Amino acid sequence: MTRRETGAAGATGAGERRKAAAPNGIGAAARRSLLRWFAVAQRDLPWRRPERANDTYAVWVSEVMLQQTRVAAAEAYYLRFLARYPRLADLARAKEAEVLALWSGLGYYRRPRQMLRAARAVLAAGGRELPEGFNELLALPGFGRYTAGAVLSIARQQRHPAVDGNIRRVLSRLAGRALTNAEAEAANRAWLDEHRPGDSNQALMELGATVCAPRAPRCGECPIRRYCRDRGRAGAALTARPRRAPERRQESYWLAIHGGRVRLRRRPATAAIMPGLWELPQRRAAVSGERRLGQVRHAITYRQIAASVYAPPDGLPPPAGQWRSKAECAALALTGLTKKILRRFAAGEQA
Ligand code: SF4
């Protein structure tokens, strides 16, 4: 399950807090039930460990990684990222190519680039940590209302909603109708526990990720089903967004290996997707003597790629690019597809 910016939050005053009610008029009892459930049912995830849960930088890294990325895929990246850049200042001093290499395979490379810009902006302004004001965070590259609300509610227990796809779905089902952005934000604000707003947000996210699933909610296991107007009746219809039709592509690449090194080329800095990342040279035409190694399937958002991989014949000049050793490849920002192809066809051949 992924998280996504949907527009969200702002702090509320004490009076508004007291009057606030959840989407269908329920409030404290449902909140308590949900928090009790979260206390025992939450998954053991690395960003929830006590040493990281109150660290704005560590929470930020997890929130950015989880946008458009499944939890299972993000966990290993998160641990590697924090091991390499344990503090915001470490990230700010890193080279972009190194950060992209570490991110390689997670996709959406705009995210690490913006993180780097944000970290550098904080240091350039004389800071060592992320600012703790909602509007100050919004002023940093890559911060939307969701990310700012999530970081400040989880790490600093500030009362900010953080409406991601999971929270929007749960709140819409509780209300029995699809909520607009503004309604979801107001409903989320009403749900926030005065003392544990971070847990309130995480509990709603967790419920959406593990029980109130998009297509088949498991209402029998839901701790707040008695407060829910929908209870699974509408299924996916209530909150489903129109899906973009998949675009199927056939692509073709050269896997040229010589002396234990592989031929790679860098995508142009101006490329619309994955600018500056490294990939195998594309095979634009058949060549006499080539050898087909096989095919790799890869998905990037709505694009479903079937990539055929060929070994070029001996004796021809190598495709455009540069020779790179295995160690060099490990330090490069490779496209996810290139990583897959190298794992499948070049393991053992690269020095
Ligand atoms: S009762 Fe079902 S539809 Fe309602 S919040 Fe719980 S899991 Fe979602």
Image: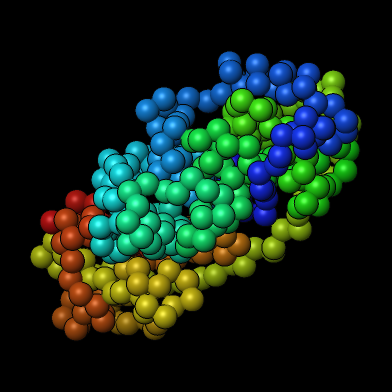
| Residue drawn at the location 10% of the way across and 65% of the way down | 259
**Left or right: 143, with 102 as reference point:** right
Residue most extreme to the left: 259
- Tell me if I can see residue 210 in this picture: no
**Left or right: 248, with 132 as reference point:** right
Residue 230, compared with residue 219, is above or below; it is: below
Please identify the quadrant where the C terminus is shown.
Answer: bottom left
- Count of numbered badges drawn on the protein: 0
Residue 266 occupies which quadrant of the picture? bottom left
**Left or right: 330, with 38 as reference point:** left
| Residue drawn at the location 85% of the way across and 26% of the way down | 26
Q: Colour scheme of this structure image?
A: rainbow
| Residue drawn at the location 60% of the way across and 62% of the way down | 302
Q: Position of residue 38 (x, y in %)?
A: 62, 22
Residue 211 occupies which quadrant of the picture? top right
Pick whichever, 274 or 253, lies toward us.
Answer: 274
Please identify the quadrant where the N terminus is shown.
Answer: top right
Residue 13 occupies which quadrant of the picture? top right
Residue 25, compared with residue 250, is above or below; it is: above
| Residue drawn at the location 61% of the way across and 53% of the way down | 145
Q: Position of residue 23 (x, y in %)?
A: 84, 36
- Tell me if I can see residue 315 in this picture: yes
Pick whichever, 178 or 302, lies toward us.
Answer: 178
Residue 53, compared with residue 56, is above or below; it is: above
Pick whichever, 189 or 242, lies toward us.
Answer: 189
**Left or right: 337, with 330 as reference point:** right
Q: Position of residue 94 (x, y in %)?
A: 26, 58
